[in-house]
Image: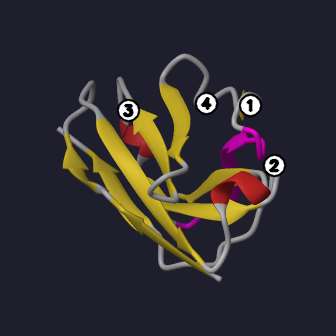
Amino acid sequence: VQLVESGGGSVQPGESLTLSCTASGFALDSTPMSWVRQAPGKGLEWVSSINSRGHVKQYADLATGRFTVSRDISKNILYLRMDSLKPEDTAVYYCEKGWNVLTRTGRGTQVTVSS
């Protein structure tokens, strides 16, 4: 099982980014998946989850209305579209197996929001 996050970067407040999580060793439609993040000096924070069938999505208050989780089963890639980014969204973002989890497995991808 391997999860590789990508797509992070440095953006200004109000801009958008789409993170990707390429999964290998298992199928994305076999398990719920989550995004979590860790800001500098802080603990892990759950961001969003999607169920195994892909039709149920849940977001933390911090993400509601700004972030969208999705996936491409044919490519086995999980996405997190982030709009209207704020400086407080600065963090390392991780994708994880499971629903509403607070774990980190891969290296994550850094998102920095600053003017």
State which quadrant residue 102 falls in. bottom right
User: Where residue 40 appears, x then y in whole percent?
Assistant: 49, 64
Can the viewer see residue 5? yes
Contact flag, marks 2 and 1 (Cβ < 8 Å): yes
Q: Amino acid at mark 1?
A: Gln
Q: Secondary structure at mark 3?
A: loop
Q: Secondary structure at mark 4?
A: loop
Q: Amino acid at mark 3?
A: Lys
Q: Secondary structure at mark 2?
A: loop
**Residue pointed to by mark 1:** 58
Q: Which residues are magenta?
A: 41-53
The answer for how far apart the CA atoms under marks 1 and 4 are is: 12 Å
Q: Amino acid at mark 4?
A: Leu
Q: Quadrant of the C terminus?
A: top left
State which quadrant residue 65 falls in. top right
- Of the numbered discs 4 and 3, the one sitting upstream in the chain is 4
The answer for how far apart the CA atoms under marks 3 and 2 are is: 22 Å
The answer for how far apart the CA atoms under marks 3 and 1 are is: 20 Å
Can the viewer see residue 43? no
The answer for how far apart the CA atoms under marks 4 and 3 are is: 10 Å
**Residue pointed to by mark 2:** 100
Residue depicted at 19% across the width and 36% down the height = 12
Q: Amino acid at mark 2?
A: Asn
**Relative depth, front residue between 10 and 69:** 69
**Residue pointed to by mark 4:** 62
